[in-house]
Image (cartoon, grey):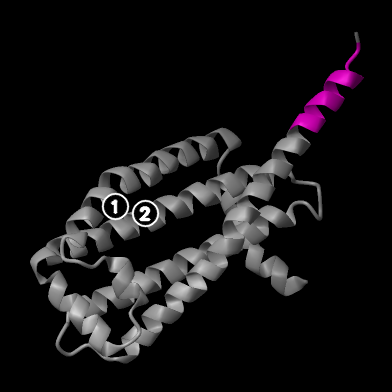
Amino acid sequence: MRLLDTLVRPFERYADALSVRTHGVVAAVSFCTFVGVIALGFVPVTRRIETSGYSTADLQAATTRAEVDAILQAFEPVMRSVMLLSVLDYLFIIAGFLLFFSLHSIALQTLAGHDRLVLLPKVGMGLTVLSRLLDSLENFWVILIYTNPDEYATLLIGLMNASESLKWMVVGVEYPTLAVSVAVALLVRFTSLFDSRSNSPR
């Protein structure tokens, strides 16, 4: 239990460092950035990359050196777009991290005093850290591969595949946890408001 408290203490400090309103502003800005990177960045850049006959998703899914080499060769005319997509991916990771952490922070402050319920946003924050770390690693292995197409270590392909698989496993739990955390926080908030109105003198 002490180990768990030690691990989640930084999450609690982050949540308490800002007010609910400030966390809301951070979440709003992060959400706009999150959506903007997808709509204005990922979509057009990915379309340019796909003119090569492949996408970066194909590269991340490749499991053999022959597959990776064929994709890298096809990427040569659009390599600038591939590089730009890697930069956008890190911006996407940062925006997603701030968005999820801010929403969980609001839930954490709302559920303060509810010993068991408050674990939801804490677990969610841990999942967010893990998923963003795996996403960053996956992107890093991809960068190491395409920036050295002739001499990259074959080990990088396995690391890229493992990071991607683990990332999607964590994301599959991360998003539902966020949804449940926010829903429970809203329910507790509305319940407390209803109770305070019911108990107020008329």
- Image quadrant in which the N terminus is located: bottom right
The residue mark sitting in front, 2 or 1, is 1
The disc label shown at residue 185, or none: none
Q: Residue at x 40, y 58 (%)?
A: 93
Mark 2 closeness class: few <14, some 14–19, many ≥20 residues within 10 Å: many
The disc label shown at residue 42, or none: 1
Q: How many marks?
A: 2
Q: Is residue 158 above or below residue 103?
A: below
Is 200 part of what is drawn in magenta?
yes
Q: Is residue 55 above or below residue 29?
A: below
Q: Which residues are magenta?
A: 190-201
Residue identifier under label 2: 92
Sooner in the amino-acid sequence: mark 2 or mark 1: 1
Q: Horizontal and vertical percent for residue 82?
A: 20, 64
Give the side of residue 52 with respect to residue 176, left or right: left
Give the side of residue 24 with respect to residue 8, left or right: left
Out of 163 and 110, give the one closest to the viewer. 163
Disc 2 residue type? Phe
Disc 1 residue type? Phe
Q: Are marks 2 and 1 in contact (CB under 8 Å)?
A: yes
